[in-house]
Image (cartoon, rainbow, N blue to C red):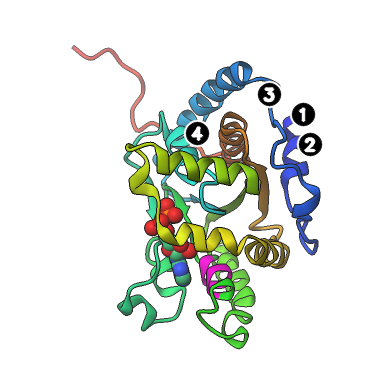
Amino acid sequence: MSRDSLLADLRVAPGHGPGLLDRDPGERVGASSKKEGAARLAEVVERLGVLHNRLYAEASRSVLLVLQGMDASGKDGVIRSVFTGLNPQGCRVQSFKAPSPVELAHDFLWRVHQVCPARGEIVIFNRSHYEDIVAVRVRKLAEEKVWGKRYDHIRGFEKLLTDEGTTVVKVFLHVSRDEQRVRLQERLDDPEKRWKFRPGDLDDRALWDEFSVAYEDVLGETSTKAAPWYVVPADHNWSRNLAVAGILVAALEEIDPKLPEPVIEPTTIT
Ligand code: ADP
């Protein structure tokens, strides 16, 4: 299958729901085995490095990758594998935790806008403004009259970003409930991973169905032509990493950043 048709399969068509229940989190995307996937990933990451260098040198446009997903869907793993090989100058990871009192004293996009990418940068949001709909709705932190208006605000906000030169790509890591159990159990059992475990993870797991409905709605409401959502099967780490790296490379190839004209002719330096 060509890369374009693969990405088209993962993309949520504007105006349609993602149909999460019909998508298999265990699907292998981009390669048929872990070994082949690792080899492909190395190529894609290398290409990403070249394109990122051009984006940074051009310094006029930027890329924002939004990562959302249930707990243990692999957001941290994606970030580690996709950012390997990128120049730390010109890329940034921004994590969004529960808002502080100061952040809560402002509108929900206040803390988000100030950390969006500058020209030349790639920024990954590890969680994002989408928590202000999904988490707020499921945990009943505000009424529907508050979070229900946010779909529109987010569409407008992302339109502003894209109009101003930021390519916005959004990825939902689609993990199964079974695989989440395995991963959370691993976190508890492994002393090196136990720090990642929050008691709230179990409360959220109990709200699996509510989170699924909230994601189904939000992905359908906010996948636009300019800022599309992709649903990436996330039960196999290698396939998930390869898919996200591929999505990012495709976004950069679409922008086609150009190196600035050299200021001098090549010459031999003595
Ligand atoms: P992570 O799970 O991302 O590795 P944490 O365990 O610290 O990191 O979880 C961050 C928590 O912050 C998540 O439970 C997430 O739902 C919550 N959060 C982030 N943004 C918001 C928000 N705007 N409103 C409510 N909760 C939020």
**Which quarter of the rendered picture does the C terminus lie within?**
top left
Mark 4 beta carbon near ligand 1 (under 8 Å): no
From the viewer's perspective, is the residue at label 1 or at label 3 nearer? 3
- Give the CA distance from mark 2 to mark 4: 22 Å
Sequence-wise, which precedes: disc 3 or disc 4?
A: 3
Q: Position of residue 197 (x, y in %)?
A: 40, 51
> Element under label 3?
loop
Q: Main secondary structure of the magenta part?
A: helix
Pointer 3 local density, CA inside 10 Å: few below 14, some 14–19, many at least 20 = some
2 and 4 marks in contact (CB < 8 Å): no
Question: Residue at the spot x=50%, y=39% of the render?
Answer: 78
**With respect to residue 43, does 184 lie above or below?**
below
Who is closer to the viewer here, 160 or 242?
242
- Residue at mark 1: 2
- According to the picture, the residue beneath numbered tag 3 turns out to be 31
Q: Secondary structure at mark 4?
A: helix
Q: CA distance from mark 1 to mark 4?
A: 20 Å
Label 4 crowd bin: few (<14), some (14–19), many (20+), radius 10 Å: many
| Residue 5 numbered tag | 2
Disc 2 or disc 4, which is closer to the eye? 2
Q: Is residue 140 visible?
A: yes
Residue 118 visible to the viewer: no
Identity of the residue furthest to the left in this view: 270
Magenta-highlighted residues:
131-136
Label 2 to label 1: alpha-carbon separation = 5 Å
